[in-house]
Amino acid sequence: MTGGGKRRGKGWLLTSAGVVLIGLGLAVAGSVGWQTVVVSPLAASAQERAAAAQSKGWSAVSSRPPPSGRGGGQGIPVQGEPRLGRTVAVVVIPRFGATWRRVIREGVDEPTILNSFNAGVGHYPGTAMPGAVGNFAIAAHDTGYGDAFRDVGKLRLDDLIYIQTEDGWYTYRFRNFQWVQPSEVGVIQPVPEQEGTAPTARLITLTTCDPPYNAQEREIAYGTLVHFQAGPGPRPNVGG
């Protein structure tokens, strides 16, 4: 009888442990499912509306020449870097969908910028501003909180990436991908992966996690500036 009691006790412990483990697994799966099915679509819709409102606000302002000290050469205005959390630009990437656009804010803080329902994309402080010589580097989630950069891997050579500011539209053309470890910060240097080298090109770098729901690596997409259009009008039609 005593041995049977011990076996029943062990069986109860194993069963209880199994229930706990299954419960934890369901909780994790439920959390991912909730984020994927409910939170991210709501966040994406809110982020697109916020970006559209920002674009509309800039479009309502008459065009003006850039103030002294904001010239980026070749007639391209370059803003000064704003304080953390302030709006930098709106990014529009047609490859991601007809309505896809996001507000870019200064900084890559998750709670206030990357997870925000009215932003979703962050600018790495200290990297170039839109249109400047150097590397305009930005980050966003691939999955979660709006899935802003979920489709980065769908970019194709020569796809256009539009950056709108109060000065106008900066058009970058996608060039190539790179995959790196999360600790590899060289991709946001003025000349990616070439520390100490003086930049001569006007680059954009998009960074996000890869693969989805795992984040073992970072997926990097590079582009180069090909056009600037001043003023508050609609985005330019830049051909091949």
Image (cartoon, rainbow, N blue to C red):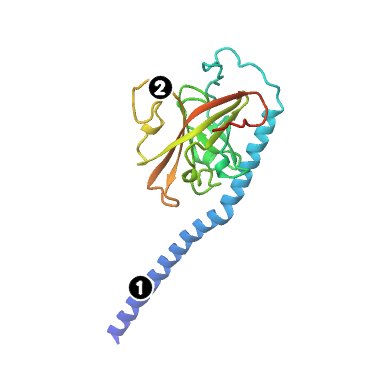
Q: Quadrant of the C terminus?
A: top right
Amino acid type at mark 1 = Leu
Image spot of residue 221 (x, y percent)? 44, 38
Image spot of residue 46 (x, y percent)? 63, 44
Q: Nearer the viewer, mark 2 or mark 1?
A: 2
Q: On screen, 15 above or below 183?
A: below
Determine the image quadrant of residue 220. top left
Q: Residue at x 59, y 47 (%)?
A: 43
The answer for how far apart the CA atoms under marks 2 and 1 are is 62 Å
Which residue, given by chain and number where applicable, does mark 1 sit on?
14
Q: Residues within 10 Å of mark 1 (few under 14, many from 20)?
A: few
Q: Secondary structure at mark 1?
A: helix
Q: On screen, 211 above or below 168?
A: below
Residue most extreme to the left: 3
Image spot of residue 215 (x, y percent)? 41, 48
Q: Residue at x 52, y 58 (%)?
A: 33
Q: Is residue 48 left or right of residue 187?
A: right
Of the two numbered discs 2 and 1 on the same chain, state the one appearing first in sequence: 1
- Marker disc for residue 152: none
Q: Residues within 10 Å of mark 2 (few under 14, many from 20)?
A: some
Residue most extreme to the bottom: 1
Which residue, given by chain and number where applicable, does mark 2 sit on?
199
| Residue 185 seen anywhere in this rendered image of the structure | yes
